[in-house]
Amino acid sequence: MTPRNNARIGRYVRWFNRCAWTAFVLALLSIAYSLAIDEPATVIQPAIQRNSA
């Protein structure tokens, strides 16, 4: 590979790493947020009420 190709691939790898880490951090934040708010319970409850009605 030519050095210019390596530089271009390195730039793509850095962009990919940045995007991957950003997505990973956002996923962790959303999981922590849903656990703190206890979102699953509020999502499951209306379904149970709808089935019993």
Image: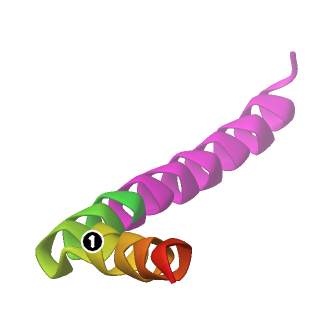
Disc 1 element: helix
* Residue type highlighted by circle 1: Ala
Query: Is 9 colored magenta in this rendering?
Result: yes
Q: Give 12 or 43, whichever is nearer the viewer.
A: 43
Vertical placement of 16 versus 49: above or below?
above
Seen as rendered, the residue at the extreme top is 1
Q: What stretch is highlighted in magenta?
A: 1-26
> For the stretch drawn in magenta, what is the main secondary structure?
helix
Q: Is residue 12 magenta?
A: yes
Image position of 16 with respect to 35: above or below? above
Give coordinates of residue 51: x percent, y percent: 54, 72
Question: Which colour assignment does the render follow?
Answer: rainbow
Mark 1 surroundings: few (<14), some (14-19) or many (≥20) residues within 10 A: few
Residue behind mark 1: 41
Residue positioned 53% across, 50% down in the render = 20
> In this orientation, which residue lies closer to the viewer: 39 or 51?
51
Query: On the rendered structure, is 52 left or right of 16?
Result: left
Q: Which residue is drawn at 34% across and 60% down?
A: 25
